[in-house]
Image (spheres, helix red, strand yellow):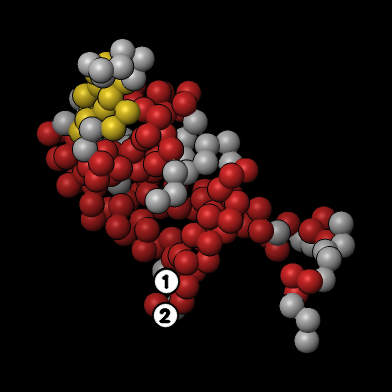
Amino acid sequence: MPDQSDTPEPPDRWRSLPIFERPGFLIRRLHQIHVALFAEECAGENITPVQYSVLTTLDHLGTADQTALAQAVGLDRTNIADVLARLSKRGLIDRRIASDDRRMRLATLTDAGRLTLERLAEGASRAHLRTIDALPPHERQAFIDTLKRLVDANNDVGRAPLRLS
């Protein structure tokens, strides 16, 4: 039996399918669902999933320049600047100009940012679990691995490619 990837897709295949069978629609819909679950589980902190990603990335990286941070979380330069400005205004991160390169802006998690991450830990974990909870436990890691493979394979076509390391 030939591999399915060897058989060309008819150009109208996806259009002929109901919308709830199209990968793009399903990915967008799952994202909407996860954002809603995150908001529910982390209510009261006024943090978005993207802001949470930035905070957790800074927690792992320590001090990071905006470009490296944008690449680590898959945001473009304009969006990372907006996210960092909001987090800075709330006192969750510190921003400063790099002493060795005045064009570079550095960000660091503050103590308030660390405390926020601690308060968010259980809620964010529940949101992640609830997003994949419909899958039997033995399928969850396979699902994550498949998502990672798709992101890795298509990373270069995104508006803000991740720095894969």
Image-based side of 16 in relation to 119, left or right: right
Q: Secondary structure at mark 2?
A: helix
Q: Going 58% across and 36% down the picture, which residue do you hit?
A: 159
Q: Which residue is mark 2?
A: 138
Q: Is residue 125 above or below residue 95?
A: below
Q: CA distance from mark 1 to mark 2?
A: 7 Å
For disc 1, the neighbor class at 10 Å (few under 14, some 14 to 19, many from 20) is few
Q: Which residue is mark 1?
A: 141
Q: Going 41% across and 34% down the picture, which residue do you hit?
A: 70
| Residue 87 in view of the camera | no
| Residue 114 in view of the camera | yes
Residue nearest the observer in this picture, 61 or 47: 61
Image-based side of 95 in relation to 137, left or right: left
Residue 130 position by quadrant: bottom left
Q: Going 23% across and 55% down the picture, which residue do you hit?
A: 122
Question: Percent x, y for residue 121?
Answer: 23, 52
- Circles 1 and 2: CB atoms closer than 8 Å: yes
For disc 2, the neighbor class at 10 Å (few under 14, some 14 to 19, many from 20) is few
Quick one: which residue is furthest to the bottom in this view? 1
Give amino acid for label 1.
Gln
Q: Is residue 43 above or below residue 131?
A: above
The dot on residue 28 is none
Q: Going 52% across and 37% down the picture, which residue do you hit?
A: 160
Q: Secondary structure at mark 1?
A: helix
Q: Is residue 111 above or below residue 40?
A: above
Question: Percent x, y for residue 24?
Answer: 66, 53
Residue nearest the observer in this picture, 63 or 124: 63
Image-based side of 65 in relation to 4, left or right: left
Question: Percent x, y for residue 82?
Answer: 41, 23
Q: Quadrant of the N terminus?
A: bottom right
Give amino acid for label 2.
His
Count the numbered circles shown: 2
